[in-house]
């Protein structure tokens, strides 16, 4: 089953409330697992990039802290940002604008 088939099945409304709750729980669990994997791959001092929800720009910075929910990234000229780990991509060379 691909994502389009899953979305169609959900939108057609053939699920009970308990089944929808189970789907939501599975998605939350999968998201949490991805976040943990992302956090484990990062260390303080790594160069990362992410797309800002506030500005829509791709920001490049350095990891300064890894917390339970967010990773603090220092972005030159923009200050420190608390970003969910699953929004970060590790990069080799920072290209600061």
Image: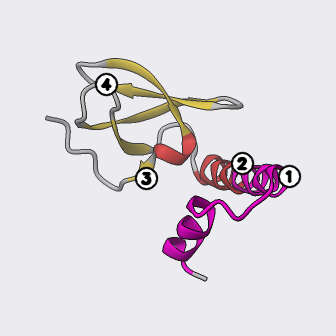
Disc 1 from disc 2: Cα separation: 15 Å
Q: Are marks 1 and 2 in contact (CB under 8 Å)?
A: no
Up-down: is 12 above or below 41?
A: below
Mark 4 vs mark 1: which is more N-terminal? 1
Disc 4 from disc 2: Cα separation: 24 Å
Residue on which the image places disc 1: 18
Numbered disc in front, either 1 or 3: 1
Numbered disc in front, either 4 or 1: 1
Mark 1 vs mark 2: which is more N-terminal? 1
Pick the residue in front: 4 or 11.
11
Residue on which the image places disc 3: 90
Disc 4 from disc 3: Cα separation: 21 Å
Disc 4 from disc 1: Cα separation: 35 Å
Magenta segment includes 27 = yes
Disc 1 from disc 3: Cα separation: 38 Å
Residue on which the image places disc 4: 54
Q: Quadrant of residue 78?
A: top left
Find numbered disc 2 in the image and state the secondary structure of the residue it sits on. helix
Find numbered disc 1 in the image and state the secondary structure of the residue it sits on. helix
Q: Is residue 77 left or right of residue 53?
A: left
Mark 4 vs mark 2: which is more N-terminal? 2
Up-down: is 60 above or below 79?
A: below
Q: Start and end of the magenta stretch? A: 2-29
Q: Residue at x 59, y 64 (%)?
A: 12
Count neighbours of disc 3 (C-alpha within 10 A) and say few if under 14, some if 14 to 19, many if 20 or more: some
Judged by its main secondary structure, the magenta piece is helix
Count neighbours of disc 1 (C-alpha within 10 A) and say few if under 14, some if 14 to 19, many if 20 or more: few
Find numbered disc 3 in the image and state the secondary structure of the residue it sits on. strand
Mark 3 vs mark 2: which is more N-terminal? 2
Residue on which the image places disc 2: 28
Pick the residue in front: 93 or 24.
24
Numbered disc in front, either 4 or 2: 2
């Amino acid at each position: 089953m691909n994502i389009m088939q899953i979305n169609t099945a959900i939108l057609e409304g053939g699920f009970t409330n308990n089944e929808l709750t189970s789907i939501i729980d599975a998605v939350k669990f999968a998201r949490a697992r991805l976040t943990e994997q992302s956090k484990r791959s990062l260390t303080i001092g790594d160069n990362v990039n992410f797309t800002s929800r506030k500005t829509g720009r791709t920001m490049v910075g350095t990891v300064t802290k890894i917390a339970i929910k967010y990773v603090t990234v220092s972005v030159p000229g923009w200050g420190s940002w608390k970003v969910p780990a699953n929004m970060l991509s590790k990069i080799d060379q920072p290209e600061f604008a």
